[in-house]
Amino acid sequence: MKLSDMSPDTHGIVKGLSGDDHFLKRITSIGLTDQVDFQVVKNDRKMPVLVYVRETLLALNRKDCERIEVEVKA
C-alpha cells in the first residue's frame, strides 16, 4: 500500500522507498527510513499528508507519498 492511500489515525510501518538518489537522501534525512513506525495524522485529498514519525510532525506532498510503500500496523 502507498502512504497516500492510508486513512487518518492509522499506524503503519515503512516497507520500502523508491525514487532517485535525491529523493531517497531527502526523505531519509527527515526520518522516514525502512521499518520505522509512523502515524497518519491527516490525509485530505489535494493537501499534503501529515505524518507523525520519530516525535516529529511531517507534511509530505502527495507525489512523495506515492513513492513510499507501507504496511498498516495492526
Image (cartoon, rainbow, N blue to C red):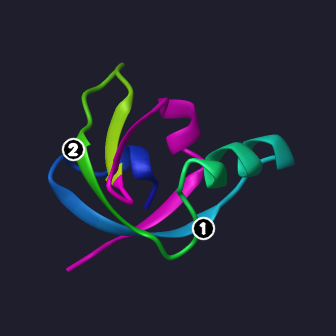
Task: Evaluate if marks 1 and 2 touch, with contact meaning CB atoms under 8 Å apart.
Answer: no
Dot 1: few (<14), some (14–19), or many (≥20) neighbours within 10 Å? Answer: some
Would residue 42 be found to the left or right of residue 19 on screen? Answer: left
The N terminus: image quadrant: bottom left
Foreground residue among 5 and 51: 51
State the extent of the magenta-drawn residues as a range: 53-74
Residue at image position (56%, 47%) is 30
Q: What amino acid is found at the position of numbered circle 2 in the picture?
A: Val
In the rendered image, the residue lying farthest to the front is: 55
Mark 1 vs mark 2, CA separation in Å:
20 Å
Q: What amino acid is found at the position of numbered circle 1 in the picture?
A: Gly
- Tag 2 residue: 41
**SS at circle 2:** strand
Residue at image position (57%, 38%) is 64
In the rendered image, the residue lying farthest to the bottom is: 74
Taking the magenta stretch, the answer to whether it contains residue 68 is: yes
Disc on the earlier residue, 1 or 2: 1
Foreground residue among 23 and 53: 53
**SS at circle 1:** strand
Residue 23's spot in the image, x, y percent? Answer: 73, 43
